[in-house]
Image (cartoon, helix red, strand yellow):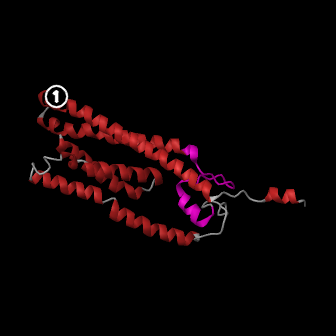
Amino acid sequence: MSFGMRLNQQPVMLSTADINDLSKKRMWTMVLAASVGVAVMLAYFAVVAAWRDSLVAAARQNFSETTADILPFVLILPSVGFFLTALIWGEHRSKRYALMCPNCNTDLSRSMKRLAATRCCNSCGKQIVEGSRTHGPGVFARRSRIEQRKFLVYWFWIWPISGSLMLGYHWLSPIGFEDCPQMLFMPGLIGTAATGWAFARTLDKRYLPQFVGSAVVLCMGFNAFW
């Protein structure tokens, strides 16, 4: 067997630089999408704020007092859809920078951190990244679960909890945030953006409770702000 034939039979290997480059491109694509989503949300809120009083008055006149009370919440809900649409668009665009396994053609874009640590495809199990392993699959999985659990439990719940506390203080003392009323919706806005980003990147359902909690606090915060 010739030397050229042996070279042709060697498996295709990726470099750490390739992984980092694709990861950065995907990250900036999602950052752009999240920024667009937040901008569209704020623009929508500005439009709703301009028409809110007239819409509520029309609902009170043509329907009932209950409808008028519910309408501000209903008007806010589409903003969440705008933000999620931007994230879905970003996820679709980021597929241009997908990292495919050269052996089994599996998309490894959502497991780049694992790939960089184990050097192996999590589907076929073959080594596809140059260099020696830094962690075995089992060690990496246990470490990731611990890190993710801390992140989920202690970080993402900060935003809906802090937003709820601010809203509670506002209801007890309506003039408490008179000088800075934006604080009534900022925790919910940040929490919705952060948890929406995490869910779009990983599709991990454990982010959904924090996302829903942040979205509810965001809606209540904007209602109190207006």
Q: Which quarter of the figure is the C terminus placed in? A: top left
> Relative to 121, is 91 above or below?
above
In-front residue for pair 26/124: 26
Region of the chain picked out in magenta, as a range: 95-120
Task: Give x and y (percent) for residue 131.
Answer: 66, 66
Residue shown at the point (51%, 42%) measured from the top left: 92
Q: Is mark 1 on a helix, strand or loop?
A: helix
Tell which residue pokes out farthest to the right in this image. 1
Residue shown at the point (57%, 46%) measured from the top left: 97
- Asked if residue 81 can be seen in this view, the reply is no
Instruction: Say how many tags the image has.
Output: 1
Given the image, on which type of amino acid does mark 1 rest?
Answer: Ser
Task: Give x and y (percent) for residue 217.
Answer: 25, 50
Residue shown at the point (63%, 63%) measured from the top left: 120
**Residue position marked by numbered label 1 in the rendering:** 54
In-front residue for pair 65/32: 32
Task: Give x and y (percent) for residue 137.
Answer: 57, 69
Q: Name the side, left or right, on which 37 lies relative to 133.
A: left
Magenta stretch: residue 156 in it? no
Magenta stretch: residue 105 in it? yes
